[in-house]
Amino acid sequence: MLVAAAVCPCPPLLVPEVAAGAAPELDIARAACLDAVGVLAASRPDLLVVVGTGEDRRCPAGGHGTFRGFGVDLDVTLGEPGPAAQEPPLPDSLTVGAWLLDRAGWAGAPVEGLTVDERRPAAECARAGEELAARAGRVALLVMGDGSACRTLKAPGYLDERAEAFDARATAALGAADLAALDALDASVAYELKAAGRAPWQILSGAARGAGLGGRLLYEDAPYGVGYTVAVWS
């Protein structure tokens, strides 16, 4: 059963070494993410699953992630090191999640990862979430995903007038733990707006069914024209 969740954005720029001189610009977002991980630790889960976008894949504990592709000599491990170190590198979303857990000094439950294609239909995401929630008596999720990437002319996806309203709906739903509103996010529109967080958020919605969790918004902004939301459910 799901007992807690943290929703965080997953730009590699969240990592100070990657952001370099621009690191202070995300200090508030970074602090909010660490506070959110603290809520997960306080829930004393039996299992923590980091959920993000990428090729459909389960990532066991010990998976290896790296920021070398961003010009930084920095590697991370998903949970405790183990045989999974021989598997392909973690997708970027889980690599940032693993970095957050390391930064927060995670020493609680075992950690695993799950990535899903950002075009995965909502119903399939919900079923995947229900399966995650049934994995252990007390399950926590660290859900990594960004909102639209089309909030400004200089955004990665250029300016789309639909982006601000989409992010507002998603942020309100995440902050209120509104499962129906999350389920209603349109997968096609999200893909057009490059909102990679849509599928992980709908996995969270599926996992939370029947759990009776409440939500709390910790941070919302759109630096670099990309929607970032930090929220906790407990």
Image (tube, helix red, strand yellow):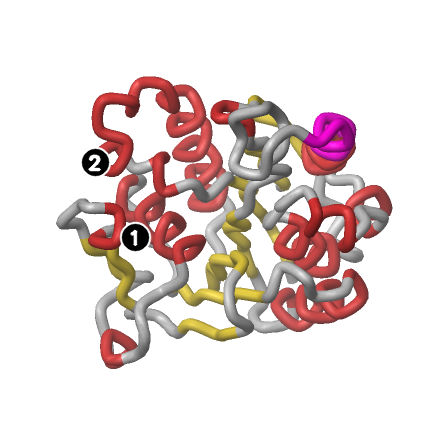
Tell which residue pokes out farthest to the left in this image: 73
Give the image location of residue 122, x and y in percent: 78, 61
| Residue at mark 1 | 107
Q: Where is residue 51 drawn, in percent x and y?
A: 53, 58
Q: Residue at x 31, y 47 (%)?
A: 99
Identity of the residue drawn at 32% across and 61% down: 78
Which of the 4 quarters of the picture holds residue 83?
Answer: bottom left
Q: Seen in the image, is 65 located left or right of residue 125?
A: left
Mark 2 or mark 1, earlier in chain: 2
Q: Position of residue 92 (x, y in %)?
A: 39, 55
At mark 2, the secondary structure is helix
Q: Position of residue 145 (x, y in %)?
A: 55, 46
Report the side of 59 relative to 181 (left or right).
left
Decide which of 104, 11 is in the foreground and name it: 11
Q: At label 2, which amino acid type do we have?
A: Glu
Task: Magenta stretch: give its range.
Answer: 160-168
Residue kind at label 1, given as amino acid type: Ala
Q: Residue at x 51, y 46 (%)?
A: 43
Q: Dot 2: few (<14), some (14–19), or many (≥20) neighbours within 10 Å? A: some
Q: Residues within 10 Å of mark 1 (few under 14, many from 20)?
A: few
Find the distance from the CA under tag 2 to the CA under tag 1. 23 Å
Main secondary structure of the magenta stretch: helix
**Is the residue 27 above or below the residue 142 in the image?**
above
Which of the image's four quarters has the C terminus?
Answer: top right
Q: Quadrant of the N terminus?
A: bottom right
Nearest the eye: 152 or 27? 152
Q: Is residue 74 left or right of residue 175?
A: left
- The residue beneath circle 2 is 17
- The nearer-to-camera label among 2 and 1 is 2
Residue 162 is covered by the magenta coloring: yes
Left/right placement of residue 7 relative to residue 35 reads: right
